[in-house]
């Protein structure tokens, strides 16, 4: 994600928070289930790889109220922890 300079901010920059999960395009159906389950987010094409898709959540309240509690209640296990 690229930052865009904006003169309405005193620093000249806007800071944003994004939660993102990347998968191969064949798993787009799985990422769509995230949207159904969490009631937020969007699917977008991965800019870094042509065969990839991302599930992304950028609304602060959705990250605070849905994504963070999900990981607090169901922590990652194994090597991903």
Image: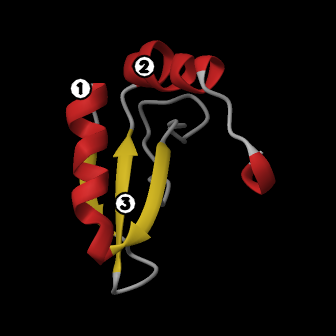
Q: CA distance from mark 3 to mark 1?
A: 16 Å
The x, y position of residue 40, in whole percent, is: 26, 30
Find numbered disc 1 in the image and state the secondary structure of the residue it sits on: loop
Mark 3 or mark 1: name the one nearer the start of the chain: 1
16 vs 68, nearest the viewer: 68
Q: CA distance from mark 3 to mark 2?
A: 18 Å
Instruction: State whether residue 40 is above or below residue 54.
Output: above
Residue carrying label 2: 66
Quick one: label 1, few (<14), some, or many (20+) residues within 10 Å? few
- Residue 54 marker: 3
Instruction: State whether residue 44 is above or below residue 74.
Output: below
Instruction: Look at 73% across and 42% down and name the residue there.
Output: 77
On the picture, is 66 further left or further right than 74? left
Find numbered disc 2 in the image and state the secondary structure of the residue it sits on: helix
Mark 3 or mark 2: name the one nearer the start of the chain: 3
The x, y position of residue 20, in whole percent, is: 47, 50
Instruction: Look at 26% across and 61% down and name the residue there.
Output: 44
Q: Specify the quadrant of the image occupied by residue 58.
A: top left
Instruction: Look at 68% across and 39% down and name the residue there.
Output: 76
Instruction: State whether residue 39 is above or below residue 7.
Output: above
Are the residues tagged 2 and 1 within 8 Å (C-beta)? yes
């Amino acid at each position: 994600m690229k930052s865009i300079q904006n003169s309405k901010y005193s620093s000249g920059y806007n800071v944003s928070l994004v939660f993102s999960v990347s998968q191969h395009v064949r798993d787009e159906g799985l990422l769509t289930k995230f949207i159904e389950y969490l009631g937020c987010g969007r699917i977008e094409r991965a800019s870094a790889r042509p065969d990839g898709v991302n599930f992304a959540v950028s609304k602060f309240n959705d990250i605070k109220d849905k994504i963070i509690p999900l990981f607090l209640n169901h922590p990652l296990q194994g090597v991903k922890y």
